[in-house]
Image (spheres, rainbow, N blue to C red):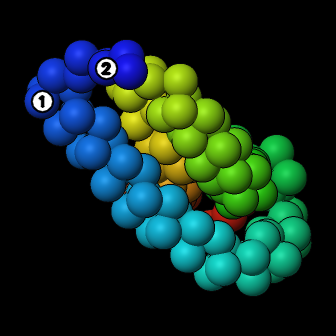
């Protein structure tokens, strides 16, 4: 019977990546649910005059709308890369939804600081 020589370091790396993927998938997957009402109401951000040309408002809406898609793509790609033993890239893809969250928060902070909290900036 052929034995595979897998070092203890590789097993630990694989287990740590698996744990990270599971936790990240649970957290980001659950965050899809509160994002859905925000996506439905995001069209209201363009009600005030001039908001349709506001870069931070458009950035926030794109970030909100893209979040579920980025999350699903990150989850699926992360697990595919994990099965192919490309652990670092699996962690990177599983962490992609963090970018949407950071971009959305940055757009909100920008509007609060430079646009006096208005969507028309």
Residue for point 22% across, 34% down: 11
Residue at which label 1 appears: 8
Looking at the image, is 81 positioned above or below residue 95? Answer: above
Q: 91 or 52, which is in the foreground?
A: 91
Q: Horizontal and vertical percent for residue 73?
A: 69, 43
Residue for point 45% across, 68% down: 27
Residue for point 53% across, 33% down: 83
Question: Badge 1: few (under 14), some or many (20 or more) residues near its Cα, within 10 Å?
Answer: few
Q: 47 or 93, which is in the foreground?
A: 93
Total numbered labels: 2
Q: Horizontal and vertical percent for residue 87?
A: 38, 28
Q: 58 or 39, which is in the foreground?
A: 39
Q: Secondary structure at mark 1?
A: helix
Residue at which label 2 appears: 3
Left or right: where 73 falls relative to 17:
right
**N-terminal-most mark, 1 or 2:** 2
Q: 118 or 70, which is in the foreground?
A: 70
Residue 96 in view, yes or no: no
In the rendered image, the quadrant that contains the N terminus is top left
The CA span between labels 1 and 2 is: 15 Å
Q: Horizontal and vertical percent for residue 65?
A: 77, 57
Q: Residue furthest left?
A: 8
Looking at the image, is 87 positioned above or below residue 39? Answer: above
Residue 44 quadrant: bottom right
Left or right: where 115 falls relative to 12:
right
- Observer-side mark, 1 or 2, equals 2
Residue 90 in view, yes or no: yes
Q: Secondary structure at mark 2?
A: loop
């Amino acid at each position: 019977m052929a034995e595979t020589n897998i070092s203890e370091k590789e097993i630990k790396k694989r287990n740590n990546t698996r744990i990270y993927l599971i936790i990240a998938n649970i957290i980001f997957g659950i965050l899809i649910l509160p994002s859905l009402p925000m996506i439905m109401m995001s069209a209201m951000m363009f009600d005030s005059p001039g908001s349709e040309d506001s870069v931070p408002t458009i950035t926030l809406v794109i970030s909100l709308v893209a979040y579920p898609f980025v999350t699903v793509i990150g989850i699926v790609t992360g697990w595919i890369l994990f099965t192919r033993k490309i652990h670092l890239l699996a962690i990177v893809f599983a962490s992609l939804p963090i970018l949407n969250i950071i971009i959305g928060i940055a757009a909100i902070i920008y509007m609060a600081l430079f646009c006096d909290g208005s969507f028309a900036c």
